[in-house]
């Protein structure tokens, strides 16, 4: 019997953080948070979530902030 088991990324979800300033350039309403889950699958059917990758990007200065670098203001806006 052959089993097809592996991992694959899920659908990306983006959210614009309103009234939140970028810690680097101090511009407001420029941060966009992207969340993408990674799934374990069996026969290309997602079974369970392995992890969620979250990061925020400023559209003004192009700085990227990973989940560990989020400020409390960014966490509250999510």
Image: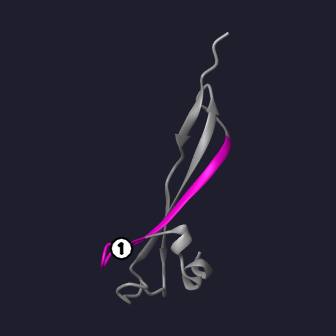
**Which span of residues is magenta-colored?**
48-64
Which quadrant of the structure image shows residue 42? top right
Q: Position of residue 70 (x, y in %)?
A: 53, 76
Q: Is residue 41 above or below residue 57?
A: above
Quadrant of res 22: bottom left
Residue placed at 44% from the left, 87% from the top?
A: 21
- In x, y percent, where is residue 10? 54, 46
Tell me the crowding category of disc 1: few under 14, some 14 to 19, or many 20 or more residues within 10 angstroms, Cα based.
some
| Residue 64 place in picture, x, y as percent | 40, 70
Horizontal side, residue 57 vs residue 45: left or right: left
Residue located at (55% from left, 70% from top): 68
Magenta-drawn stretch, dominant element (helix, strand or loop) = strand
Residue 24 image point, x, y percent: 38, 84
* Colour pattern of the rendering: one colour
Q: Is residue 65 left or right of residue 1?
A: left
Kind of element beneath mark 1? loop
Number of dots carrying numbers: 1
Residue at far left of view? 61
> Does residue 7 appear to the left or right of 29 in the view shown?
right
Q: Is residue 51 magenta?
A: yes
- Residue 68 versus residue 40 in the image, above or below: below
Q: Is residue 4 magenta?
A: no
Residue under the point 57% across and 46% down: 38
Residue pictured at 54% horizontal, 68% vertical: 67
Q: On the picture, is 69 further left or further right than 43?
A: left
* 33 over 23 or under it: above or below: above
| Residue wearing tag 1 | 63
């Amino acid at each position: 019997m052959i089993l097809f088991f592996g991992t694959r990324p899920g659908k990306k979800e983006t959210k614009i953080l309103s009234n939140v300033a970028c810690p680097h350039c101090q511009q407001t309403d420029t941060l966009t948070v992207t969340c993408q889950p990674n799934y374990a699958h069996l026969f290309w059917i997602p079974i369970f979530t392995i992890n969620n990758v979250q990061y925020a990007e400023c559209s003004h200065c192009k700085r990227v902030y990973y989940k560990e670098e989020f400020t409390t203001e960014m966490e509250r806006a999510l």
